[in-house]
Image (spheres, rainbow, N blue to C red):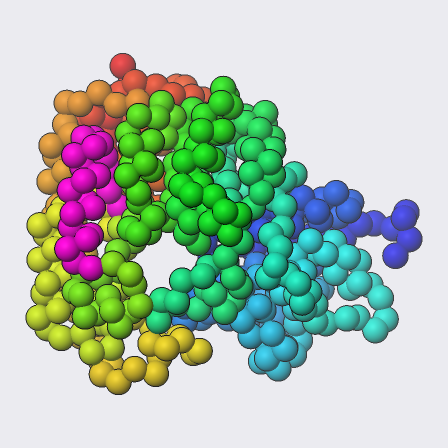
Amino acid sequence: MTTNAKMPTVGFISLGCPKNTVDSEKMLALIAEAGFVVGADTGSADIVVINTCGFIQPAIDEANDIITQALADKRKGKIKKIIVTGCLPERAKEKLLEKFPKIDAVVCLGARDNIAGVIENMFSDPVPKFYESPADWVDKIQKDTDRLLINPSHWAYLRISEGCDRTCSFCTIPSVKGKFRSKPLNDIIAEANQLADAGIVELSIIAQDSANWGKDLGEKDGLVKIIGELEKIEKLKWLRPMYLNPSGATDQLIETIAQSKKIVHYIDMPIQHINNEILKVMRRPDTHEKIAALIEKIRKAIGDVVLRTTVIVGFPGETDQQFKELLDFVKQVRFDALGCFTFWPEQGTKAAELPGRIPQKIKDKRRDSIMLAQQKIAFEKNKALKGQVIECLIDENQPAQAAVGRYYGQAPHIDSICLVEDCDDKPGNFVKAKITGFEGYDLLAKRI
């Protein structure tokens, strides 16, 4: 391709979790720096890059559907080239090309930073089709500075580690992402400063297991150290650690969150289940008693804490009584927010080999029971908030419409929102608002 040729347009589709979003933002920046035109319509771009998730079967199904649609557009001549990146290539490798032979390139996770070169190679002959992760990829962590942000320009994700050393029997992450490895503190702070200088006021701190940061570097309570450094960045107003496993919620971390001026009083703590036997087969280090005591400790230390969790129903062998124990716990503890997933027997995991599979109808019924119980709790909590004054971060504001914002108890792209009347403040501004009611899970408020 000559330098005076018209540069190809690139459409980008980002699927999956916040960690995938970070990868997408880094790839978009690399593509733009190489001179390609990014942000094109994915139905008519010269090249479409699909960054996939491959964690569980529904995510794989979604990725397959998107790939199938892109291939259909390619056959019709609407787009010219298709590149598939992310977790699905890392998990499926060359098998993805066997399933979709008309894909032009498959890029594994460790080859992320070569995305601009992959696009360049689309114009070579022959065209390389498979880009594998380097052998030493699982010993390193990629830098995430200089990203082209997808989300609003006032909040962003800050990834502090990659991979996982836990052996949860249901999880594919260690086999896809590799062993746990912490991003060096200097790199984390450099990235945070860069984001703050770009106008970011809220950072969601993400990892496979945030509280585990630094263990491979000989650090104890490493997340506390990160928080201390991030608090020094004046432009940052809200820090939101995500993915705190119960075993990582130490007394020092809880105290740090309670006393911090910038860490929001919001704890995202996946418990997965509460029955001791199920937890044991899941290979989780927690017990019913430990989790209950921890929640009590957190609420005592942080009086206004918002607690979010995730649970899995229909795990192999889960009896009606074991499910009832989980349902009763949800009703008793009254989490502020909860996500519930039905078990998926992921290929390559220990749980996929377990006997006692639960029929899908029963799994769906159990999920619905959990979510209906949680809905009642959420609505009751919303009702109790009426009349309270909150600090709200504005995310969107359109003329003649209520502004869209969040208070500290609402994580972006995960939880509910606040709809703020009489508010003409720009996105990224913090405002005081009085809660006037609720509409489903969302809060209604009026600008003070």
> Where does the magenta region start and end?
287-308
Magenta stretch contains residue 290: yes
In the image, is residue 411 part of the stretch drawn in magenta? no
> What residue is at 18 percent from the left and 65 percent from the top?
276
Q: Is residue 437 visible?
A: no
The number of discs equals: 0
Residue 89: image location, x then y, percent? 58, 69
Q: Is residue 301 visible?
A: yes
Residue at image point 35% right, 26% down? 260
Q: Nearer the viewer, residue 301 or 412?
A: 301
Figure quadrant of residue 447: top left
Left or right? Give the position of 2 relative to 375. Answer: right
In the image, residue 297 sits, relative to residue 313, either above or below, namely: above
Name the residue rendered at 72%, 56% in the picture. 114
- The percent position of residue 108, horizontal first and vertical second, equals 63, 65
Quadrant of image for the N terminus = bottom right
